[in-house]
Image (cartoon, rainbow, N blue to C red):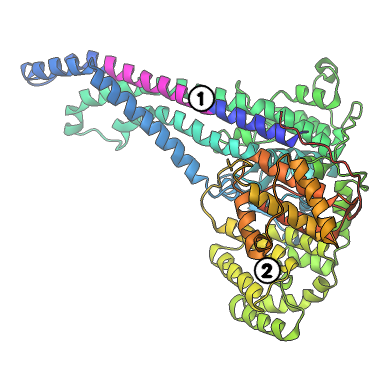
Amino acid sequence: MDFLEHQKKARGRSQKLYWIFPVAVLLVATGVWLVLRWSLWLLLPGTAAVSENPSAWEPIVDSGQHWLGSAQFMFWTIGIVMAVIFVSSISKMFSLRGGGMKVASLMKGIPISHESSSHERRQLLNVVEEMSIASGMPVPPVFVIDSRSLNALAAGWTPEDAVIIVTQGLVDRLSRDEMQGVIAHEFSHIVHGDIRINSRLVGVIHGIMVVGGIGRCMIRAPYRDGEFDEDTFKALPIMIILMIIGFFIMVVGSIGTLVGRVIQSAVSRQREYLADAAAVDFTRNPDGIAGALRKIGARGSRNQLGLISSSEFAHFFFTNPVSGWLSTHPPLEHRIARIERVPVEDIGRITTVGGGGPGVSAGIELGIACAGLQQLGEMTPSATEHARSLMDQLPRRLADSIHTALGAQAAIVGLLYDPEFKLQRKQRSMVSSRLGAPVTAEIKAIHPYLIAMDRVQKLLILDLSVPALARLNRFETERLLQVVELCIEVDERTDLFEWIVGRIILRRLRLRLSLHVSREGRRTLAQVGSSAACAVYAVARRGAREEAAADAAYAAGIERLGVALPVPDRSAMSLEGLGKAFDELGEAALEVRVAILESCLVAAANDGMIRTGEYEMIRAVADALGIGMPPILPGKVKRSIPTVSAK
């Protein structure tokens, strides 16, 4: 599954959506203008006839009918309706700026954690963590909806604010392999940018549907008090006019709603096939996701979710959560047939549980597929197995701690503790005064485990702590951010690993505090060329003992990039200079960012080895670029790295 190609298709679908939306808005607005024009044209004379003084109404009626037929009335009506729709859409998107957490709240999701969950829920959390580590993605918080239906969804704007939401029925009834297939499907939506399109689509549909809502409000307006007095009776003709106009506006709005549902269905269906294929690629187990689909199909109509927000967010889900003839998902039989590579007729009626069909050889590792980069060499075990082995190596006391909000804070700060006793005592004093005694005590308990770890394991601890940090409120997150900055600055000197860890931590904490939706970068390689050179040379220097070896690795990386960039000045390679360069790289277009990361990998592998220091720097570059970087086993690799093509 080509990450870059999928992202391009996702953006193409999004651009088509932007063209369909204004056309649909214009049609709805024109419909409202026609309704108002002909309704008022016909009803104004009737209003005069039933009034106490019909002759007094005649000039008003003549003037009104003339104005109703004017271009001025048409432009004002269409303009106001379009403005209402666009403002409603933007307002809805703005209300989702909280990312996946906001969607989880609307879906009445309950956050789950290791310390308070059943065995089945802990198994779900383990699957999510394995997928995250293997793909190089931040570990998303996990929520459970209290429903017996079998369904799941991923929501958010970016991988940093994404969440995974599953129903309790899915947790209870799926095996581990089936659960892995479903979670891999949802991770595909996160990695390939589908969640951003889904969030925008909610705003689009809401804006188009708001006209129908206005019509319904006009129909119900006369009954809002529930009583009719003498004044109400006198205003009855106007009320009738409002109800008739409201009815026709509701009809026009219903057409808009239909258009919105068509857009929702058209955008969603093909993505589900692609996510299914990606899940098979990721897990190398087609029986897992196929078995999950069979279990869902066996429930039939009993699998409806039954939440008010289900229809609005239907395109987010693993399978369609509501009934209706305009389904947002392909038929289950068709999805299973594609997964198992058999004709649809051979699937038959889904009434049995379990997998079936011939296996599919995917040939792509989970982590590499998610990151959009091809294999560096013959790396065994597979990315998922490697992720599981890394987690198994963690001491139980430390693993339990980082899954709590208290322990996650302790681990993050503990990673930054200075080995020098005097400076560490100063850091402990700062932590105690700002984060409190419980966090200080927890750092003291887990710090021996942290200092015994190698640097790859320390980066793993950072990744696994993210979901627990998401449970902190804004004040607690700001306080932790301040402590992290102080711990880095306390010794007035920063070594490279401390800089890398601190940079990754600070970026993720600041993203948690940010309320705006991050925009996709658009800068070209020519615009960020000097920063790209700094990133490639930083990786080259980390793996070379001599200047000549670093220059050779840099030359190989730049050759892969396809441009001529001189070796950066030493002043640009200071930590401050690297920080500015990495910040600029995040503003580049997706194809440019992928190409830069590939060049860094080529530079690292130039001598046939991936060293721990090189992996650390690559992780920092990948984090700045906003691209997931799966764990790389340090050691020998093949010299050649396949191209990630931009088709």
> Quarter holding the N terminus?
top right
Give the Cα distance between marks 1 and 2: 46 Å
**Secondary structure of residue under mark 2:** helix
Q: Which residue is mark 1?
A: 19
Q: Looking at the image, can residue 208 be seen? A: yes
> Quarter holding the C terminus?
top right
Near-viewer residue (398 or 516):
516
Relative to 325, residue 378 above or below: below
- Who's the residue at 45% across and 39% down the image? 90
Question: Which kind of residue does numbered mark 2 sit on?
Answer: Gln
The answer to whether residue 456 is left or right of residue 534 is right
Specify start and end residues of the magenta stretch as a single range.
Answer: 18-38
Locate residue 331, reporting x and y percent.
72, 23
**Secondary structure of residue under mark 1:** helix
Relative to 83, residue 75 above or below: above
Instruction: Tell me which corner region of the image, top left, top right, bottom left or bottom right, holds residue 403.
Output: bottom right
